[in-house]
Structure formats: structure tokens, C-alpha cells
Image (tube, grey):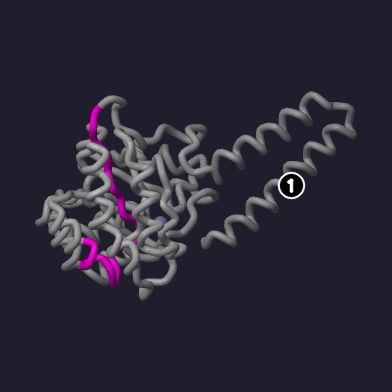
Amino acid sequence: MRKNQAVARAVATGTAAAGAALLLARAGRPGRAAAVAAGAVALGAGAFTANAPLLGPLVRRGAPGEPLAALTFDDGPGPSTAAVLDALQRAGVRATFFVLGRQVERHPDLVARMRDEGHQVASHGWDHGILVFRGPRHVADQLRRTERAVEAAAGSGALTRLFRAPHGFRGPATWATARALGYRMAGWTAGVWDTAEPGVEVIVERCRRALAPGAVVLLHDADGWDPSRERGQTAAALPGVCDAAAGRGVRLVTMDELVPA
Ligand SMILES: [Zn+2]
């Protein structure tokens, strides 16, 4: 399910809930009607608000006072991942990659390289489909297929048990299923919106502002929907981003190092 389909489903569900609330109100049950309406609004807001705690706890921030932060890259591996890895290697920085299983199958060598160079490989699910309306079986399938792809690419143990839902959108089954399979769920403290390609300097400046102690910065080494899409600006920004972290006295580490399990 793509983002626009999920939003259409949410609107339909919200309309149905509003209809139910209206019927209850007409039937002389205003209290029950208000509860139905409030519940639907809260669940909808939680599902489509990334990093909202309503639908399960998230790993998203390091301990305050520790001069550590994490760069995270979603949606890869893709055509720009090698350039991202090159830049991180030159800066001596290790990061966390939330890989899509579908992309791992296309670029297994890049996942092996992430592992070899000390980066954390984490899960972003199989195909970037929105999980808000999906049940436990579908969520488990997304996670298990990605586990098998990473194992084939980089060996067992290469995939850490950290999962970031596509767009950060979660439904009632998302967290419970991920937890049952041994995952913690990841959020972030600052989105850079590098996918909009605002220019290298803008990406560096947004990262500089975001890189406070404990920060988890969301970047992209690929695109969730278009496997051919490049992220050249993000790769080109990384030397400046790593310098900015050093300038703020923050050491860049993986998410498992920032927030140990
Ligand atoms: Zn994504």
C-alpha cells in the first residue's frame, strides 16, 4: 500500500467513524458518540504522526548530556549508497542504515560493505508499503523477508533487531508484531527532508542545527518508491555534516551505540 492509498483508506475510515458517531448521537447516546469520535481521531493522529508514542515506544534519542548522535539512512541500498559509504569512510564515521529487503536483493554487495565497515544494518521492511492498516501476518512477512535477504547478502547476524516503519507510520499491529519478533522500533529527532533535494549547503545546515547531543538525524541514501533515484546531494553533503558534528563536539555513532538495548 502506497502513501496516497493509505491516506485514502484513513479518510474512508475516519468518515465511517464520524458516521458511527453521528448515528450514536442521533440515537440519544452523545457520550458514546463523543468517545467513538475521540478514539478515531486519536488513533488516526497516532498512526500518521511519526514518532508519536501512542502506538508503541520508540528508540529515538540518546541520553541527555552524552556528546553522541547518530546519522541514519533510509530506503537503500541504491545507486548513491556507495558514495555515501565512501564519504563516511573518509570521515571515519559509522552510521545506521535502515535497508529495504527489496533493495538488499538488488544490491547485496553494498550490504556486505556496510557490515564490513562497521555500520549498523537495520530493517525498514521489505517494500516500503504503509503498515497502518496491515495485520500481524503482513508485518511479520515484511520483517522476515528482509531478514532472509540480509542474511543472504551479508550473513546471519548482519541485521540488527531495530526496525523503522516506512514514513514512521504505524498501525495497531505494527509494534506488537515487531516486538514479538525481537525488534525495537526506531524513530528520529530530526528529519532533514533531503529527499526534496534542497541543495548540499541546505542539507549541511539543517544537519548542523539538528546535531545536538542525543540526536537521531534522518537522511536517505535511496528512495522508497523509485529504486533508480539517486541521492547525490545527500552523499555530497556528508563531509560538511561530519565536520558540523565535530564542530558541535558531538561524536557520531550507530543507533545501538547511542541507545543500547
Ligand atoms: Zn523510507
> Image point 36% across, 75% down: which residue?
228
Is residue 98 visible in the rendered image? The answer is yes
Q: Is residue 211 above or below residue 199?
A: above
Let me know if residue 80 is in the magenta part: yes
Q: Quadrant of the C terminus?
A: top left
Q: Is residue 93 left or right of residue 13?
A: left
Counting labels gives 1
Q: Is residue 74 above or below residue 14?
A: below
Q: Is residue 38 above or below residue 90?
A: above
Say which residue label 1 marks: 16
Mark 1 is surrounded, within 10 Å at the Cα level, by few (under 14), some (14 to 19) or many (20 or more) other residues, namely few
Let me know if residue 209 is in the magenta part: no
Answer yes or no: disc 1 within 8 Å of ligand 1.
no
Q: Is residue 194 left or right of residue 42?
A: left
Farthest residue, direction bottom = 228
Residue type (three-letter) at the residue carrying disc 1? Ala
Q: Which residues are magenta?
A: 66-84
> Image point 48% across, 51% down: which residue?
131
- Residue 172, position as x, y percentages in the image: 51, 40
Considering the numbered disc 1 on the image, is that residue within a helix, a strand or a loop?
helix
Q: Quadrant of ligand 1?
A: bottom left
- Residue 130, position as x, y percentages in the image: 49, 55
> Image point 40% across, 64% down: which residue?
199
